[in-house]
Amino acid sequence: MTENKSKIYLDYAATTPLDQEVFEAMKPYFGEDFGNASSAHQFGQKARQALDKARAQVADFLGCRNEEVIFNSGATESNNLAIKGLVYKTKIQKSNVKGQNLPHIITSQIEHHCVLDTCKSLQESGLAEVTFLSVNKEGLVEVSSLEKVIKENTVLVSIMYANNEIGTVQPIEEIGKLIKKLNQSREQKIYFHTDAVQAINYLNCKVDDLGIDLLSMSAHKFYGPKGVGALYIKKGTPVKKIQDGGAHEYDLRAGTYNIAGIVGLGKAISMVNKETADRVKKLRDKLISGVLENVPNSKLNGSPEKRLQNNCNFSFPGAEGESIMMALDMEGIAVSTGSACASENLQPSHVLMALDLKLEESHTSIRVTLGKYTSDEEIDRFLEVLPKVVEKLRKISGSGQEAKKKLPDDFGC
Amino acid sequence: MYSKKVLEQFLHPKNMGSIKDADGVGKIGNIVCGDRMTLYIKVKSKNEKGKTVETINDIKFESFGCAAAIATSSMITELAKGKTLREALELNRETVAKELGGLPPIKMHCSNMAAQALHKAIEDYRNKLKSKNEK
């Protein structure tokens, strides 16, 4: 822990530290209260009570009924269950158009891989037809473009609430209204799913305000433990379970309850508050203006206004992203990058590519994400270190201001 | 992920910059794969017992890329400086990686092009010399 004292964590979109109070709430369930919530005896019933309480905490946060909350292992599982589960259960009511009897899904090109790959997998297996909607330069899904691709056999629209890389906040309420309106005169109902992983800490997640049928979340993004998440499934939404076994979670998610984790999720979500979000937003604004003022030739990626309170994403042409990240790490500052050089498959981030960023800009991008433990002093320190790091790397690449014309060269790999 | 030597060379790269009147220039990489580097050499030739010996007298690099790309660039300049062209041509990506205490497997190809750039710089020097002699 002492080693961490001087370190600055600015990667809250990747994961957040477990809140001490949350940890305290979880502790008994690793020890004396170890019971299986499916058991009828007193050990089991104690666990059951904890499970019910956590479910009520989530339901309270979302403004839904308790039985509409399904606990599971995290957002990847939630998104898989929402999309696959709905497709497996949905029978296309009627289709006059040839070749259109498969369920049609609409999603965006900048979704998390667990949504994109789930959709691709259904498409490849011949179980669904998928439209991957493009976004505008700020990473926004345009509602009018979405409306245009809706078809007779559309069963699901899955659009993330806020993007994990560039922080763009999508017009979920507006999309919800559109779908509600269209559903009034459609035979095949369209269901609406949102991956709200990054949104829980910062945005209104009352499901009725949003007009959604399915919402995914993951506890470790809001100061809860890793390995536990939840899916909101509005009553009446057709979803078939994708992991077979016991009848846990209203027969929608088989597997013994991770009680300690679920308790942690419930406690963590009950602690989310607007004051923290407002404070983080102020720090973010300071960071963004500080970077744009102090680093020459820097650019903010994503939307300046429709942006998550804790997200910053920049490009610094001439200084490669992985190098910036490593150099900051050597200074004890943790950020992340969308550069191809830092990814496991050496591909640049699909999100940045969907924004139509120049390759140079995606290779030189870094993401800085703040959280409730971020202090004013930490932002000051970041703003002191970053300009030096970028300047040094630009010097090494020979692409200082005076040598900008050198950049687009291609010398053959 | 990176060895201590890689991080050291990345944080304190040697011989960075360009040489205006370089005798040979080697460029490698492109913006699609992300890494690009330019290597500059100055060659000194002297006569030893009737034979011409060409030595790399000065060497500098410019590198846009990840930490591994910068470290390998710096390392190649250290390895090549003072070497004869013949010796320098024996340096390859394995030599560079070994000197750096190893590289992550994924970085072995794309971020380890420094030796190639050196070979190109030597080739450039020889081509220039040839056309000069022909004149």
Image (tube, rainbow, N blue to C red):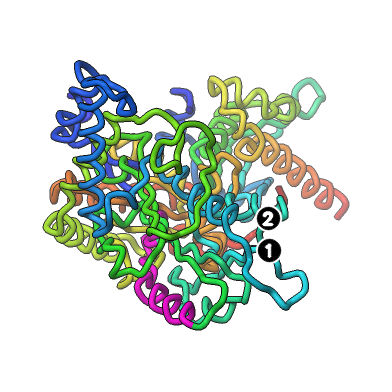
Q: Nearer the viewer, residue A405 or A330?
A: A330
Query: Residue A341 placed where, x, y %?
Result: 54, 44
Query: Residue A395 placed where, x, y %?
Result: 44, 50
Q: Earlier in the sequence, mark 2 or mark 1?
A: 1
Q: Give the image quarter of residue A233.
A: bottom left
The type of residue carrying mark 1 is: Leu
Q: Residue drawn at (61%, 44%), measured in percent from left and top?
A: B39
Above or below residue A75? Residue A365 is below
Query: Residue A359 placed where, x, y %?
Result: 57, 60
Q: Are marks 2 and 1 on the same chain?
A: yes
B22 within the magenta span: no
Residue at mark 2: A127
Q: Give the image quarter of residue B104.
A: top right
Q: Nearer the viewer, residue A385 or A89?
A: A89
Assign a secondary structure to mark 2. loop
Count of numbered circles on the image? 2
The type of residue carrying mark 2 is: Leu
Can residue A314 be seen here? The reply is no
Q: CA distance from mark 2 to mark 1?
A: 6 Å
Q: Residues within 10 Å of mark 1 (few under 14, many from 20)?
A: many
For this orientation, the residue located farthest to the top is A32
Which numbered disc covers residue A147?
none
State the extent of the magenta-drawn residues as a range. Answer: A161-184
Which chain is disc 1 placed on? A
Which numbered disc covers residue A102?
1
Q: Label 1 near label 2: C-beta < 8 Å? A: yes
For this orientation, the residue located farthest to the right is B134
Residue A34 shown left or right of residue B127 in the figure: left
Residue A285 shown left or right of residue A242 in the figure: left
Query: Residue A355 placed where, x, y %?
Result: 51, 67
Q: Residues within 10 Å of mark 2 (few under 14, many from 20)?
A: some
A181 within the magenta span: yes
